[in-house]
Structures are given as C-alpha cells and as structure tokens.
Amino acid sequence: VRLVGSEMCIRDRTEIAEFYVDHFFQNQGIGAALMEYAKQEHRADHLWVLEKNERAIRFYEAHGFSLSGQRRLEAGTTEYVIKMLAIE
C-alpha cells in the first residue's frame, strides 16, 4: 500500500515487512490508518523493528503490538531487530 509520503508491505500474509511514513507527514494519522488497514484487511499479527528505534516501538505498542522477547541480527548489518506481536 502506498500513500503519498508513506509505504507499507505485507509479507507472508500476516507480517508487516515494511512500514514507513515520511517525517513531513507524521502526526497526521497516516501511520495509524495504515496500521489499522494492515490489521483489519490483512490480519497482520507481527513485525520486526530495529531495537534502537524507540519511537517506532512506542508507535507499535500504541497500536496493539507488544515485544515478544525475540531478537535477531538484521542481515548484512550490525543492528538488531526485535519481534513484536499483535495483542489479541
């Protein structure tokens, strides 16, 4: 799904693989609308987020996701990603 200044990709039917809203368009409800669309239309139930991206983690928590405790090294980088699961 693409809206001006944003992008979202669903992988394997339920994983939010990419989620991005350009900073010029943040705090306008676009991210919330995309997240609701992913959860309602695609039954998105998990995602991976950079461990150091505290702002994104707070956003996902505010939209019904919680930390799973799973962590892995992001391929080709020295960064860790953590898995978040939708709260039922």
Image: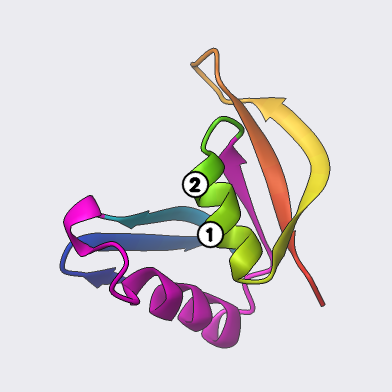
Q: Which amino acid does label 2 sit on?
A: Arg
User: Distance from label 1 to label 2 (Cα)?
Assistant: 6 Å
Residue at the far bottom in the pictured view? 40
Residue at the spot of label 1: 59
Mark 1 in CB contact with mark 2 (< 8 angstroms): yes
Left/right placement of residue 88 relative to residue 44 reads right
Position in image of residue 4 (x %, y %): 15, 68
Splitting the image into 4 quarters, where does residue 78 fall?
top right
Q: Quadrant of the C terminus?
A: bottom right
Give residue 84's position: percent from left, percent from top.
71, 52
Q: Label 2 belongs to which residue?
A: 55
Q: What range is drawn magenta here? A: 22-50
Above or below residue 86? Residue 83 is: above
Left or right of residue 57, residue 7 in this image: left
Q: Which amino acid does label 1 sit on?
A: Phe
> As drawn, which residue projects farthest toward the top?
78
Left or right: 8 with respect to 86?
left
In this picture, is 26 found above or below 39? above
- Counting from the top left corner in percent of width and height, residue 79 is at 55, 20
Q: Nearer the viewer, residue 3 or 59?
A: 59
Q: Looking at the rendering, which quadrant does residue 47 occupy?
A: bottom right
The kind of secondary structure element at disc 2 is helix
51 versus 65 height, above or below: above
Residue drawn at point x = 56 percent, y = 30 percent: 52
Q: Which residue is drawn at 75% across and 32% down?
A: 71
Q: In which quarter of the image is the N terminus?
A: bottom left
The colour mode here is rainbow
Q: Quadrant of residue 15?
A: bottom right
Queried whether the magenta region covers residue 84, the answer comes back as no
